[in-house]
C-alpha cells in the first residue's frame, strides 16, 4: 500500500504505508493516457493535422508502398519527416541537435494526440474527459511563469531553473511552429490557438512524466528518481502479478502490454519514499554523466543520497589509474595496469577519483597519494578521456535506440563496441564505468555467438552428423569461454564496488550470468557444470524475487541442479559397470 505526499527535495513523491520485501509488488497500473499513437489509423489522424505531411490511407485500398504499416510503428516514425524551418532556432534550449529534434517532435505528437483524444476513444464522454484532464494536471510540470528571470545564490536551484527553462523554451518553439504549420480545421489548431497554456502544459507533462511509448500513469509517474533506487519497473509480460489496481481494472485488456508493475528491490519500511531509476544502464555510470542525462532528459539536478555520498567521498564509477602512481606511455596505460592483472609480487593498481567540486572532473584524489593531494592529469590525457567518454555515450545511446536494426548496422555496432572497449581499457582502465558498460555489451554478444555455435553442434548430433559424445565442448573455443568468465568476474567486482544499498547486481548482470552458466553447463563435464551452477547461485535470489518472471525461475532451478543430475548419472553408470565387472570375475 502506498500514498502520495510531499517529498523533502522533489515535490510530491510516492511513499510506502507498509513494509515491502525484495521482489514484492508495490503497484500495478495501466496507463492513464498514452501521448503516442499506436495504430495506423491513429497515426494517420495525428499526421493529418499538420501541413505538408504525406497523408496515410487506412482503408482496404491502403497504399502498400507507404512507409507506414502496423508492424513498423516506432516512437520516432510518426512525424519523422516533419520539416523544421531553418529560421526556427532550437539551439537556445541547451540540448544537442538530436535531443532537440526528438523532444520537439515528441511534444508536437503529444499535443496532436491529446487534441484528438475524444475522436480516438469513443468511451471518453464529457465527464470522463474532465476527470482525465484533472488527473493529468495533477502531475508535475514546470510552470512557464517560473521561467528564471532572476539569478539565484543557490547553485542547485539555479541549475534546476536552468533545466526547466530549457524545456519551457522548447515548448514555446513547438507552440510557435504549430500555430503556423497546423491545418486550420484540425483539433490541434483549435487547441493551440484557443487554449495555448493548456497545450503547453500538456507538452510539459509529457516531457517530464512519460514512460516508454508515451505512457502516463496516475501513480507510477509520481515516483521520484534515485541513483540508488529501492524499486524497479517491470512489464506485466515478464512478471507474475498478484495485485491489480483499480486503475488497471478500468482499462481495456488491449492495454495489458503497457501495464507497469513496480517491485521492491530492497526492504522498504513504512513511511519510506519509493524511488526508481530514470537512467537505465546509466544508473551504473559515473556521477557527472548521470547528472547530465537527468538534466537533458528529465530537467532536474539529481541530489539523491548516492550523488551526495559521491560528492563527499569520491565517484567510484569514474575512477582511473592514478598518474602519480602509474606512468603512461603518452596517453596509454601499461598493459598490466590497464587490466589490473598485477601478480602478488607486483604493486597493486591505485585509482584516483574525481575530487569534489572539480570542474569537468579534471582534478582527482588518490587514497595512496593522500586525500589532501590534488592530482592533475596531463591536459592531453584529459582531452583523450573526455573524447572517449563522449564516444562511448554516443555509442551506447545508438545501441539502445528503438530505430529498426539490420544485420549491417548490428555488425558495425559490434565492431565499434570492441574498438571502444579496447580504447577504454588502455586509457581509462578496468574500473571505469565506460569500460564496464561496454564490457556488458561485448559479453552479451559473445555469449550469443557461443550459444548459437553450441545449438548448431547439438542439432548436428541429433541428426547423426556429430562425432562428439557428452557435451558441446568440440563446438566451442575454450579460450572464448575463459574470456567470458573473466569478463563476468570483472563486472561482478565493478558492481559490488559501487556499493549500492538497495539493489541486487542481478538487475544489470542477471541474464548474462545465466548466459555464462548455460555455456559452462553445456560443456557437459561435471566440473564445468558444477562451476556453472556456482555462478547461478550468485543470482538465484534475484530471479526468485520474480524480477524476470516465473519462466526464468524454472530455468534457474534447472541450471542449479544440472550438475547433480549429471553426477548421479555418472555414479549410476559407474555402479553398473562395477557390478558387471564383479559378475565377470565370478
Image: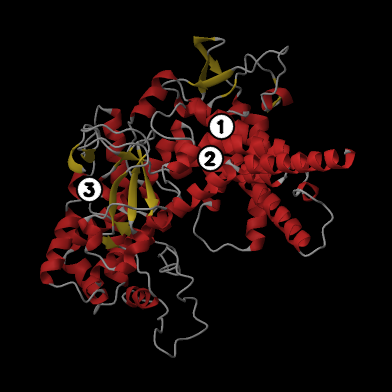
Which label lies toward us, 3 or 2?
2
Q: Is residue 566 above or below residue 499?
A: below
Packing grade of label 1 (10 A; few <14, some 14-19, many >=20) is: some
* 109 or 349: nearer the viewer: 349
- How far apart marks 3 and 2 lie (CA) works out to 33 Å
Label 1's element?
helix
**340 w.r.t. 403: above or below:** above
Residue 444: horizontal and vertical position, in percent? 61, 47
Q: Which residue position holds label 2?
A: 509
Q: Give the numbered dot on residue 140.
A: 3
Q: Nearer the viewer, residue 135 or 416?
A: 135
Instruction: State if disc 1 and disc 2 touch (CB < 8 Å).
Output: yes
- Report the number of discs: 3
* Residue appearing at x 21%, y 43% in the figure: 1
The residue pinned by badge 1 equals: 492
Residue at position x 24%, y 74% from top? 121
Residue 573 screen position, x and y as percent? 75, 43
N-terminal-most mark, 1 or 3: 3
Q: Look at the numbered disc 2 and give the secondary structure of its residue.
A: helix
Amino acid at each position: 500500500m502506498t500514498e502520495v505526499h510531499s517529498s523533502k527535495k522533489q515535490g510530491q513523491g510516492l511513499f510506502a504505508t507498509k513494509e515491502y520485501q525484495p521482489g514484492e509488488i508495490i503497484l500495478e497500473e495501466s496507463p492513464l493516457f498514452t501521448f503516442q499513437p499506436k495504430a495506423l489509423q491513429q497515426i494517420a489522424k495525428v499526421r493529418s493535422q499538420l501541413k505538408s505531411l504525406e497523408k496515410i490511407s487506412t482503408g482496404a485500398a491502403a497504399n502498400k508502398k507507404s512507409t507506414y504499416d502496423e508492424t513498423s510503428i516506432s516512437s520516432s516514425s510518426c512525424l519523422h519527416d516533419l520539416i523544421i524551418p531553418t529560421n526556427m532556432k532550437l539551439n537556445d534550449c541547451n540540448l544537442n541537435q538530436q535531443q532537440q529534434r526528438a523532444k520537439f517532435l515528441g511534444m508536437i505528437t503529444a499535443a496532436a494526440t491529446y487534441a484528438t483524444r475524444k475522436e480516438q476513444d469513443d468511451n471518453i464522454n464529457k465527464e470522463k474527459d474532465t476527470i482525465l484532464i484533472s488527473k493529468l494536471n495533477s502531475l508535475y510540470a514546470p510552470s512557464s511563469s517560473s521561467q528564471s528571470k532572476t539569478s539565484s545564490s543557490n547553485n542547485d536551484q539555479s541549475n534546476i531553473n536552468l533545466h526547466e527553462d530549457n524545456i519551457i523554451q522548447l515548448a514555446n518553439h513547438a507552440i510557435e511552429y504549430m500555430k503556423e504549420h497546423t491545418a486550420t480545421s484540425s483539433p490541434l489548431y483549435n487547441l493551440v490557438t484557443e487554449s495555448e497554456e493548456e497545450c503547453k502544459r500538456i507538452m510539459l507533462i509529457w516531457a517530464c512524466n512519460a514512460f516508454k511509448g508515451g505512457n502516463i500513469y496516475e501513480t507510477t509517474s509520481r515516483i521520484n528518481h534515485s541513483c540508488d533506487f529501492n524499486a524497479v519497473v517491470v512489464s506485466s509480460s515478464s512478471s507474475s502479478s498478484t495485485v491489480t489496481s483499480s486503475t488497471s481494472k478500468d482499462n481495456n485488456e488491449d492495454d495489458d502490454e503497457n501495464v507497469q508493475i513496480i517491485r521492491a528491490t530492497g526492504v522498504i519500511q513504512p513511511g519510506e519514499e519509493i524511488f526508481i531509476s530514470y537512467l537505465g544502464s546509466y544508473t551504473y555510470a559515473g556521477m557527472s554523466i548521470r547528472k547530465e542525462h537527468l538534466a537533458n532528459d528529465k530537467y532536474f539536478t539529481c541530489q539523491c543520497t548516492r550523488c551526495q555520498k559521491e560528492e563527499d567521498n569520491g565517484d567510484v564509477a569514474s575512477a582511473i589509474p592514478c598518474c602519480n602512481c602509474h606512468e603512461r606511455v603518452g596517453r596509454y596505460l601499461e598493459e598490466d595496469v590497464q587490466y589490473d592483472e598485477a601478480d602478488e609480487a607486483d604493486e597493486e593498481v591505485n585509482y584516483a577519483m574525481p575530487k569534489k567540486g572539480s570542474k569537468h572532473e579534471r582534478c582527482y584524489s588518490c587514497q595512496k597519494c593522500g586525500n589532501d593531494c590534488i592530482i592533475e592529469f596531463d591536459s592531453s590525457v584529459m582531452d583523450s578521456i573526455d573524447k572517449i567518454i563522449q564516444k562511448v555515450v554516443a555509442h551506447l545511446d545508438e545501441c539502445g535506440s528503438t530505430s529498426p536494426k539490420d544485420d549491417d548496422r548490428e555488425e558495425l555496432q559490434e565492431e565499434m563496441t570492441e574498438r571502444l572497449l579496447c580504447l577504454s581499457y588502455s586509457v581509462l582502465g578496468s574500473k571505469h564505468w565506460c569500460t564496464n558498460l561496454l564490457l556488458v555489451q561485448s559479453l552479451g554478444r559473445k555469449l550469443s555467438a557461443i550459444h548459437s555455435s553450441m545449438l548448431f553442434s547439438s542439432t548436428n548430433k541429433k541428426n547423426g552428423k556429430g562425432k562428439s559424445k557428452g557435451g558441446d565442448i568440440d563446438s566451442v573455443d575454450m579460450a572464448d569461454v575463459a574470456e567470458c568468465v573473466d569478463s563476468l568476474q570483472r563486472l561482478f567486482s565493478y558492481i559490488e564496488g559501487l556499493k549500492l544499498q538497495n539493489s541486487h547486481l542481478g538487475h544489470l548482470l542477471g541474464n548474462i550470468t545465466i548466459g555464462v552458466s548455460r555455456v559452462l553447463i553445456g560443456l557437459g563435464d561435471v566440473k564445468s557444470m558444477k562451476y556453472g551452477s556456482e555462478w547461478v547461485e550468485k543470482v538465484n535470489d534475484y530471479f526468485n524475487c520474480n524480477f524476470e518472471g516465473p519462466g526464468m525461475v524454472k530455468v534457474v532451478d534447472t541450471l542449479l541442479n544440472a550438475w547433480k543430475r549429471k553426477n548421479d548419472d555418472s555414479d549410476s553408470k559407474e555402479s553398473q559397470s562395477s557390478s558387471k565387472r564383479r559378475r565377470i570375475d565370478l
